[in-house]
């Protein structure tokens, strides 16, 4: 009995090993760039991390294919390299000889991509599932383009400036033309405001033109 | 024939210009409503602002780097001293002496020479049109800098939302933002493509800003220059400090200044240096003559000329240092990205651990892998990463500001801040130059009495801005960029050289250099020394003729092509060269020919006018009085 169980186990593991290989049509290659992402705070890649990976992937599969209880043992990993890259395949929890097809695995990974990334403190770029393209984040679209706001502010200020300048020059001109007629009126009057010297003291007097001896205009 | 006494006959000169005694009276009376500077600083800042423009930032560094770096300083400095300073002194002195703008000044010297003033006006108008369009582009980028992330750092998604727009991925985010989202450029100059409303809005802002600053002439622009002429220096210093702390900046500066003495043997180097000095000093626009005419008569114009020239030269070198420190940073970024891409490809393909291949052992690793696994290696398609190539991607003109520099900015932390600072600096540089341009248009308009004199200055400047804006809408089309390059190459080059040469000739040989010397002695107290005599009479005109002839010959002989942004072209994303359609040659002749030919044509016109009206003129003589000559009120005799 024990021999049979042992033989079956060996067969099963051998079968699993055969199905998981580089360029397998049933699985994917994963590449982690931990040092690029985390620099000095990079953790070392060891068995425990690999366990976490298999657990996270099992979680992703459970999320996608509801009802099926995927386990860590359903995620088979092989061809680990120094790079920290490896291949994996997913076996069905109901029947370990059956493999889950690529489309399902891909869909599961896409769905839980964020959770998988955060488990390892990595991003779409540094935790790379080869041949699974990351979905592009939509760039933020502003409700009003910010440049229109800046434009409005500047145009408002400039417009106000122009109006102020034009109005102030018009007002200045009006003041000037108002002053000139006043000056002319004063000239027409027969008196000029003159400081007269009387007894050595300057006094503001009114010079009465009609009694002036030195005429401004000589008689022709 | 004594060469020193060479002078063409110029009858009636004394009747047209105020004498020294009259100038003294005018000085004391402060008569007339001619505008005046509030203080010397305003005048100097305005002149420096006019001279220091976008060319100092994006033309000089390129010339310096492409013509042998530090060695370029030699022809630049020599020609600055022999060509720039004498011409500048000449314009300052003639403006201060004759107390009129360019059109009035040349008409005073001799009515046949009014053509020079009119040519200056035309050139100022054409250059002002396209220069303000560049200011509109700068404003567009400035308005777009008030957001994070900056719009030129990302590609937009395509219609299906499956990926990024192809044009953007094939070129780069900054290229895409400039050629597609800003200019929306067409593929040929004859495909006009209609007006782009956002560029029209930017043009409205640019012209309105110019109008509000110049609304009352130098009364308002003189206040504006306190900021527009000084802010660029502040921003340049900030960028220098920021740049020097970035990785790669020192490589950039070293690349700029590494001298290649062989370039001195290349005549093109000297030609470019001479042209750069001439255009950089904003000579022959008429604006400088105008600005100097508002000075007091005894202002020391000699000192001013030397000072402004030195400031202009130093600014060029300073700006070049700053620009190339940032270009060095960008080159280093590109180099690092290139290397890390290659290294990633290698370790992915051969499954090496991270950090096993670094920059230091990159070459050994590459050689080893090429020998051991040549097929896999070739299939990787690694790019060559060469720092020198990245550094010499230095561009000039709008490409430098809107593509190369913006790319560097998005790699700096707090990008929007640096973008705002950079575009405010460019805006100030452009605006202060525009003050000189618009002065060169508005004042001749007033002097030539083409419009009623009773109209206030606000109307003159408003009309100029409006007409320039309306005609400048050509540049808001999809093909606007190509039109601008056309204007820049032809309207702003040969006519200026022609006018500059005519100015020198007119002052030295028609006005008379002896009279000019006496004038300067009267104004500043001592006669100009032998350096000025030699340069005014012989050296500078000679240099001008040489540059003019060579420039003309190179323009005429080369196949006229322009660069287009065409997605279908093979060399995309590099610009493709296209030949001009034949009707463009007519436009070119109009742009370059009309301002230059106005000078002889107007002289001819005046000659014919004199001949046919000679009989009437004999009967009409006027009483010579001082009051008629001194401008006592609005009514002038000229």
Image: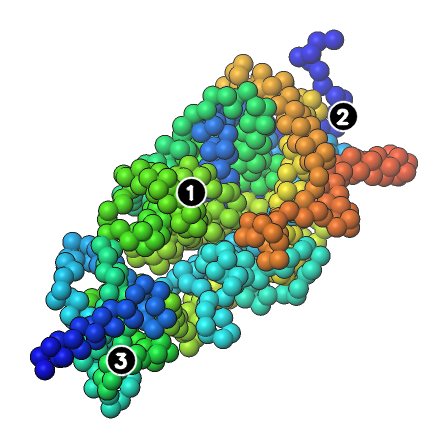
Q: Please tell me which residue is depicted at 54% across the width and 58% down the height of the picture.
A: B179
Give how far across and how far down residue B244 sits, in percent: 29, 41
Query: Do marks 2 and 1 both belong to one polypeptide chain?
Result: yes
Name the mark on residue B384. 1
In the rendered image, the vertical position of residue B333 relative to residue B525, given as above or below: below
Residue occupied by mark 2: B11
Query: Do marks 1 and 3 both belong to one polypeptide chain?
Result: no
Name the mark on residue A97. 3
Give how far across and how far down residue B526 sits, in percent: 50, 19
**Mark 2 belongs to chain:** B
Label 2 environment density (alpha carbons within 10 Å; few <14, some 14–19, many ≥20): few
Left or right: residue B600 versus residue B506 is: right
Q: Residue furthest bottom?
A: A67
Left or right: residue A20 versus residue B447 is: left
- Mark 1 and mark 3: span between their CA atoms? 48 Å
Front one among B452 and B172: B172
- Mark 2 and mark 1: span between their CA atoms? 72 Å
Label 3 environment density (alpha carbons within 10 Å; few <14, some 14–19, many ≥20): few
Disc 1 secondary structure class: loop
In the rendered image, the vertical position of residue B268 relative to residue B186, given as above or below: above
Residue B389 visible in the displayed image: yes
């Amino acid at each position: 009995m024990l021999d049979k169980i042992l033989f079956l186990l060996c067969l099963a593991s051998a079968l699993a090993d055969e199905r998981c290989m580089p360029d397998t049509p049933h699985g994917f290659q994963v590449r982690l760039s931990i040092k690029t992402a985390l620099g000095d705070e990079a953790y070392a890649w060891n068995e425990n991390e690999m366990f976490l990976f298999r657990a996270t992937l099992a979680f992703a599969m459970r999320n996608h294919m509801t009802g099926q209880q995927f386990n860590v043992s359903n995620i088979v990993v092989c061809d680990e390299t120094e790079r920290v890259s490896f291949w994996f395949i997913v076996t069905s929890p109901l029947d370990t000889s059956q493999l889950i097809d690529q489309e399902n695995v891909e869909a599961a990974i896409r769905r839980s991509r964020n959770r998988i990334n955060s488990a390892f403190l990595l991003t779409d770029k540094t935790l790379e599932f080869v041949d699974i393209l990351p979905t592009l984040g939509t760039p933020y679209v502003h409700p009003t383009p910010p440049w229109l706001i800046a434009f409005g502010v500047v145009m408002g200020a400039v417009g106000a400036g122009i109006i102020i300048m034009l109005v102030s020059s018009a007002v200045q001109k009006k003041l000037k033309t108002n002053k000139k007629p006043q000056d002319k009126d004063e000239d027409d009057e027969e008196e000029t405001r003159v400081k007269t010297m009387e007894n050595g003291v300057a006094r503001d007097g009114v010079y009465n033109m009609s009694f002036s001896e030195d005429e401004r205009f000589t008689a022709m | 024939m004594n060469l020193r006494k060479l002078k063409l006959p110029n009858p009636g000169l004394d009747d047209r210009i105020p004498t020294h005694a009259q100038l003294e009276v005018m000085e004391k009376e402060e008569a007339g409503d001619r505008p005046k500077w509030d203080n010397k600083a305003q005048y100097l800042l305005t002149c420096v602002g006019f001279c220091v423009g976008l060319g100092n930032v994006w033309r000089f560094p390129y010339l310096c780097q492409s013509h042998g770096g530090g060695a370029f300083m030699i022809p630049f400095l020599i020609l600055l001293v022999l060509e720039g300073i004498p011409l500048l002194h000449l314009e300052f002195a003639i403006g201060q002496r004759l107390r009129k703008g360019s059109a009035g000044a040349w008409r005073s010297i001799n009515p046949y020479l009014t053509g020079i003033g009119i040519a200056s006006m035309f050139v100022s108008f054409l250059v002002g049109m396209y220069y303000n369009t560049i200011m509109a582009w700068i404003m567009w980028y400035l308005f777009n800098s008030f957001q994070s992330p900056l719009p030129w750092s990302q590609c937009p998604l395509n219609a299906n939302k499956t990926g990024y727009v192809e044009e953007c991925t094939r070129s780069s985010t900054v290229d895409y933002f400039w050629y597609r989202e800003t200019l929306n450029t067409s593929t040929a100059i004859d495909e006009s493509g209609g007006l782009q409303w956002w560029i029209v809005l930017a043009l409205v802002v640019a012209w309105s800003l110019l109008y509000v600053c110049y609304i009352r002439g130098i009364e308002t622009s003189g206040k504006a220059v306190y900021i527009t002429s000084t802010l660029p220096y502040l921003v340049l210093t900030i960028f220098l400090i920021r740049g020097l702390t970035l990785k790669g900046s020192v490589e950039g500066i070293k690349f700029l200044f590494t001298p290649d003495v062989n370039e001195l043997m290349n005549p093109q180097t000297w030609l470019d240096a001479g042209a750069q000095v001439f255009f950089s000093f904003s000579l022959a626009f008429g604006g400088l003559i105008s600005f100097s005419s508002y000075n007091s008569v005894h202002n020391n114009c000699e000192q001013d000329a030397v000072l402004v020239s030195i400031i202009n030269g130093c600014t060029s070198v300073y700006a070049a240092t700053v620009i190339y420190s940032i270009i060095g940073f960008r080159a280093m970024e590109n180099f690092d990205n290139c290397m890390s891409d290659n290294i990633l490809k290698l370790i992915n393909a051969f499954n090496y651990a991270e950090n096993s291949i670094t920059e230091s052992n990159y070459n050994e690793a590459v050689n080893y892998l090429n020998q051991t696994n040549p097929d896999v290696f070739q299939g990787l398609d690694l790019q060559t990463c060469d720092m020198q190539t990245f550094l010499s991607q230095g561009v000039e003109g709008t490409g430098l500001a809107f593509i190369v520099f913006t790319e560097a900015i998005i790699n700096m932390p707090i990008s929007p801040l640096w973008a705002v600072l950079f575009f405010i600096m460019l805006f100030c540089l452009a605006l202060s130059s525009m003050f000189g341009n618009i002065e060169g248009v508005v004042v001749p308009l007033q002097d030539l009495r083409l419009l009623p004199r009773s109209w206030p200055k606000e109307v003159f400047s408003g009309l100029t801005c409006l007409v320039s804006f309306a005609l400048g809408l050509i540049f808001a089309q999809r093909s606007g960029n190509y039109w601008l390059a056309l204007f820049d190459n032809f309207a702003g080059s040969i006519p200026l050289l022609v006018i500059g040469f005519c100015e020198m000739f007119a002052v030295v040989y028609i006005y008379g250099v002896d009279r000019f010397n006496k004038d300067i002695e009267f104004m500043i107290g001592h006669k100009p020394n032998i350096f000025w005599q030699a340069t005014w009479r012989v050296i500078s005109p000679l240099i001008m003729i040489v540059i003019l002839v060579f420039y003309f010959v190179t323009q005429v002989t080369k196949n006229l092509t322009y660069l287009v942004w065409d997605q279908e072209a093979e060399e995309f994303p590099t610009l493709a060269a296209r030949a001009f359609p034949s009707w463009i040659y007519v436009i070119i002749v109009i742009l370059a020919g009309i301002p230059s030919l106005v000078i002889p044509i107007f002289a001819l016109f005046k000659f014919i006018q004199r001949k046919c009206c000679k009989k009437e003129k004999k009967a009409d003589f006027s009483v010579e009085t001082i009051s008629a000559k001194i401008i006592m009120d609005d009514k002038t005799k000229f």
